Structure formats: structure tokens, C-alpha cells
Image (cartoon, rainbow, N blue to C red):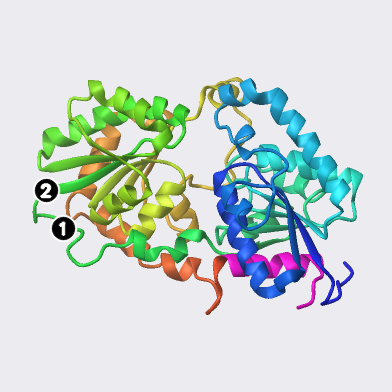
Amino acid sequence: MAELENTKPFKLFFVVGEESGDQLGAEVIKSLRALLGDRLQVCGVGGERMAKLGVNSIFPLQEIAVMGVTAVLERLPTIIKRVYQSVDAVVAEQPDLLLIIDSPDFTHNVAKRVRKKAPHIPIVDYVSPSVWAWRPGRAKKMTFYVDQVLALLPFEPEMHKRLGGPPCAYVGHPLIERLSDLRPAAGERAELGAGKKQLVVLPGSRGSEVTRLLEPFGKTIELVCAQDPDVDVIIPAVPHQEARIRDGVKSWAIQPRIVTGEAEKFAAFRAANAALAASGTVTLELAIAGVPMTVAYKLDWFFRRLNQINKIIKFVSVNSMVLPNLVLGDSSIPEFLEDEATPEALSASVLALLQDSPERRAQLNAFSQIDERMRLPAGESQAGEAARVILETAGVVI
């Protein structure tokens, strides 16, 4: 790609699909402004954080920031309309680069159409889809409409290379810059045997996850507390699932304490001795916090039915669904998938983690390596590294 003169304005068009993308986009804008100053021009689709930094979103982010099959189907006409509106806006603006952030069901549909209408516009995908877990064939298909992927997980560049995907660079995960929020200060986490053991339970952030896991998790906690009554149970609930969780735990034999908000969640992690969690980003948070965990996952009805119909479909291209296992190249964190996630199996695993067992020590030893695996070069910030690769892809010379 042709290099841009170091005095020419740099126009960056953003397309994000939810709040987490808005957070990443805002930090990238700050880093790019530090490098380019007034040369940087921003436009596109964003949320409140990006709006404060000059992105006048072409439509409200809330219109497309939906999760779950039912919610998506209800909004489908609006979502489709916004895809085409976004494509038209990109083509009209003729930016120096299109940056799509996460939410692949929306952002990739925009990118595909932009590539057909304006193939000269470089496209960078910030946050790789989970091609290592679901639909690995997506990686190769991305090469037709994505020039560069910015990965949050250190194993993803090699995974894209193996699957024939586009160039992929590890730019760090936002969590690596929040160690003080996740790791306990002196006295915050009691040693085993010094007071009540603290067990955090995390049934997921999506309604479908919560619905599938609350019942087996409740029975698991009942079995755990029957054998070890010296346990306090805490559920850090995401705000939009709080009502569902409170209603779901009414039938539990052991009533947990429910807290909400990120600050309360991280405080619970800093105090926790062990965790029972749904598979997802929260497992990486727990690993960074040094909390041994048992992980469960149940497919939603669509993927479960599809897998029953056609057993040859391979959804998973790695040997674990647990992010810390993948980051560390380790298998110390036990995972229970589908029919394996019984209360009996889960409770046995959790009980082992609530004592000074080989299973607990193995996880703690593995966690001691996580900083080294996720660290960026000295002096680099996560957003700063993302900004550097974005400019390099666009051919911008500083």
C-alpha cells in the first residue's frame, strides 16, 4: 500500500457493534491522537466513549448491540438496514482505513460489502472472531475482506496462520493493564483454613448461558456445601442478568450473595479462594486474579441440535475451550462440556480446589506464567500497539 505523506490528514472510519468495542475504539483514538495530533479524523459507528472523542455515530449503537438469537431475530430488519447504511457511509467518506471492532455478525457483513464496492480501502479487524473454537473455516474466508487482524490473545496469530487466515498480530489484552484491579492486596484473600472459604459462581453474561447453567450450578453448590459447610457463595451478576439470576436462585438450597457491577465483581475475585464459572472471558479474569476454577459450558439449542444431526461437524479446532488453558498451553483448568457438566462431576472438582490439593497447586503454578505469555514489549500499551499496527497497515509514516 502506498505510504501517506506525514502531513496529510488520516481519516479513520470505525464500525463497532457493542459497548466493549466502543471502549476499545476510544482507547485507539487516544493513542492515534498522541501520534498524529490534528491529522487524525474519525467518523463512523460508535458509542458514548467514542462520541466524546469526536465520532458522531451515524446511528445509535443501541440499535445493533443485541445478544442472543431471539433478540437478534426481533431486530433483524433494523440490523440489516444499518449494515447497508454503514457500507454506504464508508464508501461516501472514502477513509484511509476502515477499522471494524469485534461483533463479527455485524461488522464483518459491513466489511465484506465495503471490499466489493471500494476494494482500495484497507480493512483492519480489531478482535479476532473465535475461529479457534467455532467455525474455523471463517479464518480463510476473512482473507478476502480483511487485510490485518489485531488479536487480543497471544495464541491467535499462530491459529490464523494454521487456518489460512489473514495476517494477524497480537496487540495485547486490555486486562493486562488492570492487574491492580484483579489481584488481591495484602489481607484481601484469606488463606485456606483462615475463616470462611470464598467461592465465586459465574453462570455467564448472556441470558441463554444463565438459563442453561443456573440449575446445575445450584445443585453443584448444594453438594459442595453438604461436604464442606465452611463456604460462602458469591455470584457477581452482570447488571442486565441480575433479575434473571435472582429469580433463578430462589430454588437453590444454598442461597448465594449476589453483587453487581465491575467493582464488586473484581472485589469478589480478589477475595475468592476458588470459582465455578461458565466458559468465556471471565476465565481469563479469574486466571489473572489467581483464582483456581472449574469451568462448564453447555451449547445453546441450535448448536446442540446441529451437532446431533451431523456428528462429523467439527466446531472446535483446539483441545480446550478455556482461554487460560489456551494462553498457557496447559490443561490444568478442568472443563466440563455438555453432558459432562453434571452436579456430581462439578462439585468433586470444586471441592478439590477448596483444599490444598494437587489440582489447586497445578492451577496456581500455571497462573504464575500468565504475565509472561500476555506481556507486550517493554513500554508498549495495548491501545498503543493496536494504533501502531493500524498505521502500518494504512501505510502511514510518522
Q: How far separated are the C-alphas under marks 2 and 1?
A: 8 Å
Disc number for residue 190: 1
Judged from the image, the secondary structure of the residue bearing numbered disc 1 is loop
Is residue 114 visible in the rendered image? The answer is yes
Is residue 385 on the magenta stretch? yes
Q: Can you identify the residue that label 2 sits on?
A: 196
Q: Crowding at label 1, few (<14), some or many (≥20) Cα neighbours within 10 Å?
A: some
The segment highlighted magenta reads 383-398
Is 201 positioned to the left or the right of 75 in the image?
A: left
Majority secondary structure in the magenta region: helix
Closer to the camera, 196 or 140?
196
Give the residue type at disc 1.
Ala
Which quadrant of the rendered structure holds the C terminus?
bottom right
Q: Position of residue 108 (x, y in %)?
A: 73, 42
The disc labelled 2 sits on which kind of residue?
A: Lys
**Residues marked 2 and 1 touching at CB (< 8 Å):** yes
Residue 258 placed where, x, y %?
26, 37
Identify the residue shown where x is 77% and y is 70%: 39
The image shows residue 391, relative to residue 252, as above or below, that is below
Instruction: Please state the horizontal and vertical placement of residue 364, each as a whole percent of the image.
Output: 30, 61
* Image quadrant assignment for residue 58: top right
Crowding around mark 2 (Cα neighbors within 10 Å: few <14, some 14 to 19, many 20+) is: some
- Quadrant showing the N terminus: bottom right
Q: Secondary structure at mark 2?
A: loop
Residue plotted at (42% across, 63% down): 178
When the figure is inspected, residue 74 is found, relative to residue 54, above or below; the finding is: above
Residue nearer the viewer, 60 or 390: 60
Residue at 37% x, 26% y is 244
Q: Mark 2 vs mark 1: which is more N-terminal?
A: 1
Q: Place residue 316 in its image quadrant.
A: top right
Does 157 sit above or below residue 220?
Answer: below
